[in-house]
Image (cartoon, rainbow, N blue to C red):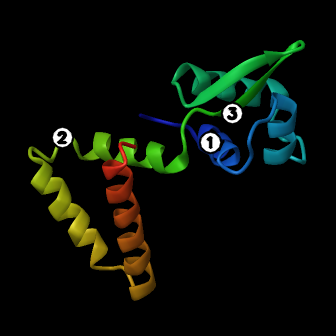
């Protein structure tokens, strides 16, 4: 999936706030007003159509929120990027293991905790 620089900035913004309308996002991303409100609105509409933002009508305006958590988006992105190069699940795990070689002890500990939580969630049916 290709995203423009503004779309990336909008997504990053929504992973740090619960919800916002176009005016809020425009002010947060462009406080000097270098972009028009319509440009930001168009980017948000594209992200909505791609399923990366959700929106609800509140009064005369839409209020947007992230369509999925950042970690889920990144996992899907990694899968789509690697799909052309990985034919078996084992290949993906081997590539991931190679990436983990560059992690320090604190990051490896955090990774272990994430894996353990995932195991527990799977056992609990989550």
Q: Secondary structure at mark 1?
A: helix
- Tell me the residue that label 3 is attached to: 65
Residue 41 in percent (x, y) is at: 75, 25
The answer to the question of whether label 3 and label 2 lie on touching residues, with beta carbons closer than 8 A, is no
Q: Earlier in the sequence, mark 3 or mark 2?
A: 3
Alpha carbon of mark 3 to alpha carbon of mark 2: how far?
31 Å
Q: How many marks?
A: 3
| Sooner in the amino-acid sequence: mark 1 or mark 2 | 1
CB-based contact (under 8 Å), mark 1 and mark 2: no
Mark in front: 3 vs 2: 3
| Position of the C terminus by quadrant | top left
- Give me the residue at 45% from left, 35% from top: 2
**In the image, residue 40 above or below residue 108:** above
Q: Quadrant of the N terminus?
A: top left
Task: From the image, tell me which residue sits under label 2.
Answer: 84
**Is the residue marked by circle 1 packed among few (<14), some (14-19), or many (20+) residues within 10 Å?**
many
Q: Residue furthest front?
A: 124
Q: Residue 26, located in which quarter of the rendered image?
A: top right
Q: Nearer the viewer, residue 64 or 46?
A: 64
Residue at image coords 81%, 29%: 22
Please state the horizontal and vertical placement of residue 87, each as a whole percent of the image. Answer: 9, 44
Above-or-below relation of 38 to 99:
above
């Amino acid at each position: 999936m290709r995203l423009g620089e503004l779309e990336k900035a909008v997504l990053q913004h929504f992973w740090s706030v619960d919800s916002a309308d176009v005016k809020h996002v425009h002010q947060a991303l462009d406080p000097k007003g270098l972009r028009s409100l319509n440009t930001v609105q168009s980017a948000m509409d594209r992200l909505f159509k791609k399923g990366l933002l959700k929106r609800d009508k509140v009064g005369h305006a839409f209020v947007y929120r992230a369509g999925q958590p950042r970690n889920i988006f990144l996992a899907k992105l990694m899968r789509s990027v690697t799909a052309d190069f990985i034919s078996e699940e084992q290949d993906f795990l081997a590539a991931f293991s190679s990436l983990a070689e560059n992690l320090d002890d604190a990051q490896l500990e955090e990774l272990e905790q994430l894996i353990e939580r995932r195991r527990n969630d799977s056992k609990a049916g989550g």
